[in-house]
Image: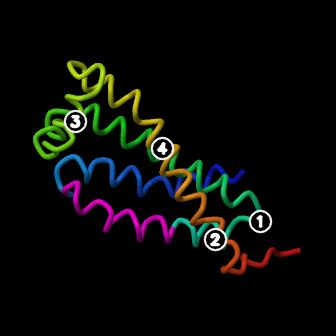
Amino acid sequence: MNWKLILQLSAFGFIMAFATVSLIPEKFEFAFWLPIFVFCAYVIAKVCNGKYFLHGFLVSIVNSVWITAAHVISYKSYAENHMDMVEAFKNFPLANHPRVLMILMGPFFGVGFGLVLGLFTFIASKIVAPKARAV
């Protein structure tokens, strides 16, 4: 596993974690995440020599840690800018404890998006030639 690469690529998740608190509306997040996923898949396919899916999956798992932490820490600002999410939380158990709910749901989002990025990465590994290694 190339943990250095995983952590480097998770920097996009770190940036998006804080950008989605108040700068990027929920309805436009997809427009930011799609190019990030494509770029990450390309880099993993180019740099790694195997376990492409797992590398992509783990980038999203690390991203979910950054995003969950940022949204929990900045919950007041997040809630002010994501009223749809606040309304949706009202239908969940622990509705009176939205930060706890976010902490519990974060890993599920990480796994879900990890499956997507893992698939992107697997497909990219079939298209992109890996970087030649010096012997």
* 84 or 77, nearer to the observer: 84
In the drawing, does residue 5 fall left or right of residue 33? right
**Relative to 113, residue 98 above or below:** above
Q: Which residue is mark 1?
A: 49
Q: Are marks 3 and 1 in contact (CB under 8 Å)?
A: no
Q: Residues within 10 Å of mark 2 (few under 14, many from 20)?
A: some
Horizontal and vertical percent position of residue 51: 74, 57
**Relative to 107, residue 12 above or below:** below
Q: Earlier in the sequence, mark 4 or mark 3?
A: 3
Kind of residue at badge 4:
Gly
- Give the numbered dot on residue 123: 2
- Give the numbered dot on residue 110: 4
Kind of residue at badge 2:
Ile
Q: Measure the C-alpha gap from mark 1 to mark 4.
A: 24 Å
Q: Which residue is mark 3?
A: 74
Residue 36 shown in magenta = yes
Q: Measure the C-alpha gap from mark 3 to mark 1.
A: 38 Å
Q: Residues within 10 Å of mark 4 (few under 14, many from 20)?
A: many
Horizontal and vertical percent position of residue 120: 57, 66
Q: Measure the C-alpha gap from mark 2 to mark 3.
A: 35 Å
